[in-house]
Structure formats: C-alpha cells, structure tokens
Image (cartoon, rainbow, N blue to C red):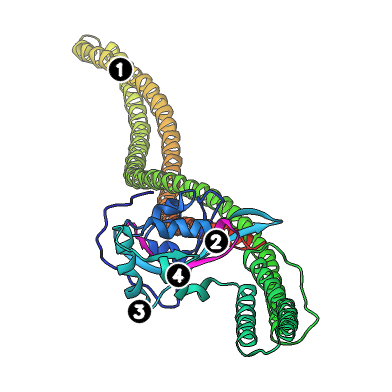
Amino acid sequence: MRDNRPVTQQEHDFADDATLMSTTDHEGYITYANEAFNEVSGFSPQDLLGQPHNIVRHPDMPREAFADMWTTLKQGEPWTALVKNRRSNGDHYWVRANAVPIIRDGVNEGYMSVRTKPSRREIEQFEPLYLAMSRRQASGRRLYKGVLLRTGPGILLDMFKVLSVRGRIRLNVGLLWLALMAGLFLFGGDPAQTAATASLASALSAILCLALERQLARPLELLRRRALDVATGNNRNVMNLDRVDEIGMTMRTISQLGLMFRWLVDDVSEQAVAVRTAVNSIARGNQDLDVRTEQASASIESTASAMEEMIATVQNNAETAEQANVLSGAASRAAERGGEAMAQIVATMQDISTDSRRIMDIIGIIDEIAFQTNFLALNAAVEAARAGAQGRGFAVVASEVRALAQRSAASAQEIKTLIEASATKIEAGSRMVDEAGQVIDRIVAQAQQVSSLIAEISTATREQSEGIGQIGQVVTHMDHLTQQNASLVKRSAAASADLDWQAGQLVEAVRVFR
C-alpha cells in the first residue's frame, strides 16, 4: 500500500456543493479528473493524469477500507463510504466517495468515483474508527460494501443491513411457519388432523413465499440490476414492468432516468465534439495569426530600423544641402562681385581704347607739325642759299631743324605704329574682356539659379526630413501596436489552447458515460 508523506494533519475545507469526480482504467490509473478534484486535491492535471489513483491516499486510511472497496467494485457493484484523502501539500480533506465500475458490453473498462462533502457528524463517527482500524484496535467492527458491521455474535444485530429481499421474505415466512407449527403442536388435538393441518400450512407457507418472491423479490432484483446497469453504463435499453405499483413505477422512473441520461450524454457529446472541432480550428487560426503577426512585427521592426537610417541620412542630406545653400549663396555673391569687377575692367578697357584713339589723333597732329616744320626748313634753306654768305648760318639752323623734324616724324610714325598695335591688342582684349563679362554674367545667372535650386532642395529636404520623421513616428507606433497585437494573439492562442484542453477534458468526461 502506498504511503504518501509528509502529512500536516491540517484539514482543508471546500465548498459544500462541490463535486469531485475522477475516472481510472481497470488497473487504477487516473484517466480523467475534473477541475474541482484538481483544485481540492492541490494537484495539477499533469500531475494526476496517468498516475495511480492512490496518489491522493492518506496514510491514516486503513487497508481494510480499500480492500472492501476493491472487492465490491470487482463484483460489479457500487461502493460508498467516507474517505480521508491527502492533498499535495500534506493537508487532508474528507469526502464521501461514491465509486462504481464502468462496464461496456459486460466488460469492465475502469472505475468512476464521485465525491461530495460529508457532514461533520459523519467525519466524527468515522475518524476514530479508521484510526483504530489502522492501529489494529478496531475489534468487533468491519466494513462490508462500505457499511459498518459488527463481527462475531454481534453480526445478528446488523443482519438486516445485508440481508437480501428474498432472504427477508423467506425469513419472515419461515418465522410465520414456525409459529404456526408451534401452535398446532401445542394446541392441536387429533394428531392426524394436526399433521394434515401442518402439511396444509407448510404448503401455504411455501406458496406464500414463492408468491412474495415472485411479486417482490424478483422485480426488486430486476430493478436493482436495471439501476446498476444505468449507474455503470452497461445497458442503455429501456426495461418496463407490466405493472404500475410502486415497483413498476420505480422501474419506469429508472428507465426514464436512463433515457434522459442517454439523451444528455449523446447531446453533450455531440456538442463537445463540435466545440472541440471549432476550438481546434480557432487554435490553428490563432497559431497562423501568431506566425503572421510575428512576421509582420519583424517586418515593421526592419522598416522602423530602415526608417531610422533613412531619417539619419535625410537629416545628414538636409544639413549638407543647408551647407551647400550657404556656399552657393557665397559663390553667387562672389560671382556677382566678379561680374561687377569684370564690368569695371570692360569700362577701363573701353577708356584705354578711347585714350589710344585720342593719342593717335595727337600723333597725327605731331606728324603734321613735323611735316610742316620740315617744309619750313626746306624753304628756309632755299632762302638761305639765295642770301649767300649772309644766310649761311641760317641755313645751318634750318638744316638742324629739318633733321629734328624728320626725327620727330620718324618717332611719331614709330609711336603711331606702336599705338596702332596696342590699339589692336586693346580692341582684341576689350572684345575678350567683353566676352568674359558676358560669360561671367551667364555664370552669375546660373549661380543664382543653382543657389535658388539648392535653396529649394534644402527646403524640400527639410520638409522631407520632417515628413519621414512623422512616418518614423507612425512606424514606431505601428510597431508598438503590432507588438501589443502579438501579445494579444499569444494570449489568445494560449486561451485557445487552454480551451482546447478543456474541450478535450469535456469530451473525455462525456466519453466515460458512453
């Protein structure tokens, strides 16, 4: 016998209307336990299923009680008595156990036990008895099919607790026959007449016994068998007696109870199977949704990470565009200043060209003066020659003046040549400077356009950065919501799994009665 320890001897109380139910296979291993049994025993379903039922046995329970229980159950009969069970933490609780075999087509498939809370008076009656039986001190007491009986000569006082209806009829008819026989032999006259009367009384007593057995014992035995079939689930057919007295109506009631029981079990079984199918579908849907939610969460997390990187890139681009905008503005202003300087150079070159033309004009005047001077010198030389000796000195002066005039004309011609070359170069330079000024003007215009475009890009980038920032916030919010949804889906999946397990337990519970 299994000895479950330690024990605390602390009693655990539970609700008065609680019903603790469990089933075992034919070897006593637990196949089902309802929630009330799990809660009161303190064991989880995983701790109970597949374990021997004596896992809840308390060491204070005597061996004789369970020996009587198994003897009764193996005879195919129900057993009921008070039992002290042990909880998982060592505490104990008292129940009135109602055990019955589960029989299908005449084959014992296991046992079912339904327990209720006993009264305090019953506990006070059985607790010292069980303690005495455990200590081998309960002389004169024993359990028989859960009923407490005396032993030895005292069994006669408890005879009517175990005597069958047929035995009661025979006992009472036999006592009546003995009384008649005693009266006849004590008060009878003629021995022959007494013997004839005794024979008649004996025959009538036998007929009365047979009639009572036929009218009472046999129907009650049939009623007992029918009630036992309903209790054990061995027979689901309707059985009727062709009578409407108390026995006949009781048979009808038991048959009706069996029909109601069959209808309830069949209907609940179908509903339980349908519920389990639906729960399985929901559980599979939740599993698929959980997988997809996890994938969506991972995708959103990746998107959020990419958005963060994009935000950083866009912000960097915005800063770069802002810097480019500043540099473009500076370049545009520098180009404008260069254009202004180039315009001043063009104006200066134009002034130089004008001055060069004026110098050419002045050189032309000098050239004309040199020509006239040379002409005058020639005239002076002619006149000096005419004057002879008086004009010889004047001729020398005229010759020098002519030489100076010729050199002045040659120098003026050289200057004119140089000025003309310079003027040509100045004109070419002026054209080039003018063209450079036009190019710089176009550069300035383009620089202004580039600066305007960069300013627009900077503004657009800033707005894009703000928009992407808002998108990032939305994605982060979506990620948070997706994580919450994933958590809800997980809880829903866990609830569906639990509901599936409960539906399975319901199917198993109903299967006990089918």
Above/below status of 26 relative to 232: above
Foreground tag (3 vs 4): 4
Tell me the SS state at disc 1: helix
In this rendered view, identify the residue nearer to me: 119 or 282: 119
Indicate the position of residue 39 as horizontal and vertical percent values.
40, 64
CA–CA distance in space, label 3 to label 1: 157 Å
Verify CB contact (< 8 Å) between mark 3 and mark 1.
no
In this rendered view, identify the residue nearer to me: 209 or 336: 209
Is residue 332 one of those drawn in magenta?
Answer: no
CA–CA distance in space, label 4 to label 2: 31 Å
Q: Give the number of the disc on residue 309.
A: none
Above/below status of 8 relative to 204: above
CA–CA distance in space, label 1 to label 2: 146 Å
Q: Mark 1 points at which residue?
A: 411
Indicate the position of residue 76 as horizontal and vertical percent values.
60, 60
Q: Give the range drawn in magenta.
A: 73-88
Foreground tag (1 vs 2): 2
Location of residue 163 by image quarter? bottom right
Q: Upstream in the sequence, badge 4 or badge 2?
A: 2
Residue 496 seen in render: no
CA–CA distance in space, label 4 to label 1: 174 Å
Q: Upstream in the sequence, badge 3 or badge 1?
A: 3
How dense is the environment of label 1, judged by Cα within 10 Å: few (below 14), some, or many (20 and up)? Answer: some
Instruction: Kindly identify the amino acid type of the residue bearing the numbered disc 4.
Output: Ile
Q: Mark 3 points at which residue?
A: 121
In this rendered view, identify the residue nearer to me: 73 or 458: 73
Verify CB contact (< 8 Å) between mark 4 and mark 1.
no
Tell me the SS state at disc 4: helix
Location of residue 205 by image quarter? bottom right
Q: Name the residue under label 4.
A: 155
